[in-house]
Amino acid sequence: MDANANMHLTLNVWRQKNNSTEGGFETYEVSDVSPDMSFLEMLDVLNERLVHEGKEPIAFDHDCREGICGSCSMYINGRPHGPLKGVATCQLHMRTFKSGDTIAIEPWRAVAFPVLKDLVTDRSAFDRIIASGGFVSVNTGNARDANSLPVAKENADDAFMAASCIGCGACVAACKNSSAMLFVSAKISQLALLPQGQAERKIRAEKMVAQMDAEGFGACSNTGACSAECPKEISLDTIARTNREYLGAKLTSSVV
Amino acid sequence: MATSPLLDAKIPAGPLEEKWNRYRSSVPLVNPANKRRLEIIVVGTGLAGASAAATLAELGYKVKAFCFQDSPRRAHSIAAQGGINAAKNYQNDGDSVYRLFYDTVKGGDYRSRESNVYRLAEVSGSIIDQCVAQGVPFAREYGGLLSNRSFGGVQVQRTFYAAGQTGQQLLLGAYSALERQVGIGAVKMYSRHEMLDIVMIDGKCRGIIARNMVTGELERHAGHAVLICSGGYGNVFYLSTNAMGSNATAAWKAHKRGAFFGNPCFTQIHPTCIPVSGEHQSKLTLMSESLRNDGRIWVPKKQNDNRNPNAIPEDERDYYLERRYPAFGNLVPRDIASRAAKERCDAGYGVGPSKMAVYLDYTSAIERYGRAEANKNNLFNATPEQIIQMGKAVVKEKYGNLFDMYKQITGEDPYEVPMRIYPAVHYTMGGIWVDYNLMTTVPGLYALGEANFSDHGANRLGASALMQGLADGYFVIPYTIGAYLANEIRSGDISTNHEAFVRTEQEVKERIEKLLSINGKTSPEQFHRRLGKIMWDKCGMARNAEGLKEAIQEIRALRKEFWSDLRVVGTANELNPELDRAGRVADFIELGELMCLDALNRNESCGGHFREEFQTEDGEALRDDENYMYVAAWQYLGESQWELHKEDLVYENIKIAQRSYK
Ligand SMILES: Cc1cc2nc3c(=O)[nH]c(=O)nc-3n(C[C@H](O)[C@H](O)[C@H](O)COP(=O)(O)OP(=O)(O)OC[C@H]3O[C@@H](n4cnc5c(N)ncnc54)[C@H](O)[C@@H]3O)c2cc1C
Ligand code: SF4
Ligand code: FES
């Protein structure tokens, strides 16, 4: 055990067997938590104990544990990814908490993200939104020399900022309407800012927004909770840009 | 020596520079109508798999793609930080296809196949073109052109990047190309699916058995070809920079069904990772090699120096890489930088609480950049504080996300105090043996990306894995697969009711039942941890014959214990991460044994494989070209039994030398 493992915590964790059964909170006491542990390592320790006791460990999505794959996804004390701004759950460390704290842990709550088990949800709706238009239609082998297409540095930088979305779904989880507008806008903005994205600019905005609606995400009421909770701090400007793109597209729409 | 008759690399004839072009224009084609009737299964949708699946679908093949994450966008490739190489020579600094080829073969310590590496260098430029066309937002200069940085083991600037998130941007590019094909129905995507075996019919690979990880259902999928793009196996060491889910299962199942495993002991230990902080540690975090562009690595000149690093004066610091390797300095290849760090720590010069760390210092870079900014902005009287502030801003733009990550994990601010770093397992050069077409020793079964053994020899250069994954997927397999599929157009649909599918599914089912029925006391996690410790201690950064022999015995004992004392809670018919883990750990244990066997067989040091018995006087790796200039390809014969086959490496276009970076 770690020499400095000295924190004690009470966890209220959402447990749900599968999509067709009802879930509920269960309470666990964990001690010997080190402030250097990540939040997920703290759950690992609890899970090891549960397995040892012959109980099912808490299921949660995770993979890179570096804040980049977007797998980890949970409310920590009511906030997507917990209390720190710009930090995904896997990068949250226990030094953020105090010994004696009680922490509530829940899966994303949104109609479009059904719970599969415990903290694991189905976010495949995001893939379908990308499949509807979140790309540049260019087949392999058709590209011209990369430097034949200069891009102003500010545009490249802004496009990169938008493209850094990790597809975690915290924006949806943070929104009282469960809108996916920030996720969708991040992709629309990235491609609208680049010359490569121009040809399909209108149709992309229309199709992605239509798919978002079809998946059961709610409408955007510009509250800004999404951007405040986004671990990559995707800016609300992307939403403003998308609204312009979408309106522009609708005015000249060929899609019905 | 002579190459084993079972290992025909199918290298096209002709001069090196013309092999690929000529071959590409002579490879049999499959006409569009026939492509629609041919099904290809792609296991894994990281850079290699996503690029392959998208491109093959664009060409008209029917494609099914599988990944174990909930979305293809989350493959481990997403975490790659530093960059991707290409011989574009945009910096006009003397780069060329030949130089990239040469650097890669030399960096790999002359243990890779010339023809494959040359092809990789040849297609590297097209990768950048393709990614830019997809809208990948690479870093750019003010003039709007692409920016480059340097990576280890080379003296030109050929690395393209997107801040410290290059893998993310490249994967999202490949993912969007893949989703575009999913959207039009050309690819059927199976997320949260794990391939658990391949199916062999009449000596050819004809499909896979996969488990739906949400319902637990076993599924049969038939295909005329199967592509294993399942990534590397660094997690055999338990602690590594790989994602938690990265595993060897797909590659290992293929191996057990006849695919030879190439150079399994070739592991890359990356020099700059955040050191272990305690027992709870679940994975290690990389601090990108790009940081060595600007950071300087040092330890105190005095042993056990506990002073705050900022209080240690310049002349009491040992910049040991600059001292030992003046020509390449902090940019020596990874294997060399890692061993040098271990040497200093073992000798008692390490820093930090565990003393198993060295400093990576940004002070001079911050000052240098600050001064350049001041000049650029005509601030000729800037104060030292202003200079430092401007310098920090530049460093933030280049490496901001890495600095933030370091701070998040360690609680220390690297803009103020030097980072503490230590080597960690990062990448596996070994993998499934493939020929020039990327086909394994099993007809119809291919391996791409980190899962194959091909291009990096005994040590991979930084920023070359992303290049290889995308080369394999976008530009190699779409052509080479024709050589096989052109003969499959008459095969027709493959029935999943075939006896081989039924039997293989049954075998998979029995194994799952076995894992669940042992009912012992020890979790998969505990077994994994113990395997990792054996591997790190005895088959890690330094190896010797005695230790390797012990390791083999210990691993066999561990395997026995695993199959008699494993505890897996939950059932087979539900989402059960414990069960997933148990199956993967079982495979890691077997692979670990083979890695030790391979390391024991290779009585030389080369690249990342350092046998303590074989070193020069000043501690550098000592190769034995006469006896070991071959690829060791292992054939599985049964539990703990393998036969070694050798593929001789022939260098016709490169002069073999002792690698020197001094
Ligand atoms: C932290 C880090 C940073 C790195 N930075 C760089 C860098 O800057 N430059 C560079 O060139 N390289 C870098 N690398 C190396 C590089 O990222 C990898 O080698 C490369 O991304 C591997 O790509 P891949 O497509 O082969 O495999 P992966 O991206 O690992 O993808 C594997 C795929 O296989 C699937 N899979 C695996 N097993 C199964 C199964 N049984 N059934 C179904 N699906 C399965 C997974 O779901 C996934 O989709 C880095 C590596 C690490 C760890
Ligand atoms: S916009 Fe932010 S919160 Fe939403 S999916 Fe992307 S990274 Fe997550
Ligand atoms: S586990 Fe990958 S972002 Fe958290």
Image (spheres, coloured by chain):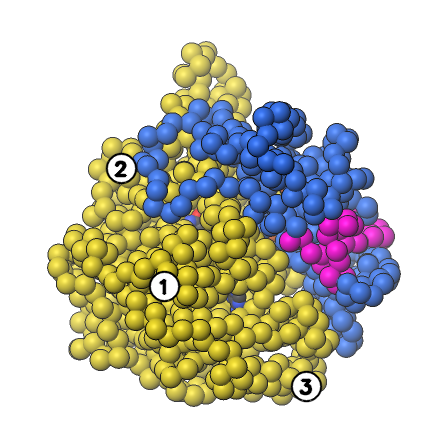
- Contact, mark 1 vs mark 2 (Cβ under 8 Å): no
SS at mark 1? helix
Residue under numbered circle 1 = B34
Q: Which residues are magenta?
A: A96-124
Q: Residue at x 24, y 40 (%)?
A: B95
Q: Please, what is the three-letter code of the amino acid marked with disc 3?
A: Ser
Whole-Å distance between the Cαs marked 3 and 1? 46 Å
- For mark 3, name the chain: B
Q: Earlier in the sequence, mark 2 or mark 3?
A: 2
- For mark 2, name the chain: B
- For mark 1, name the chain: B
In this rendering, does residue A45 appear at all?
yes
- Contact, mark 3 vs mark 1 (Cβ under 8 Å): no
Q: For residue A102: magenta?
A: yes
Residue under numbered circle 3 = B517
Colour of chain A as rendered:
blue
Q: In this image, A83 relative to B60: left or right?
A: right
Does residue B638 sit above or below A15 in this rendering?
below
Q: Earlier in the sequence, mark 3 or mark 1?
A: 1
Q: Which numbered dot is residue B89?
A: 2
Q: Are marks 1 and 2 on the same chain?
A: yes
Q: In this image, B382 relative to B119: left or right?
A: right
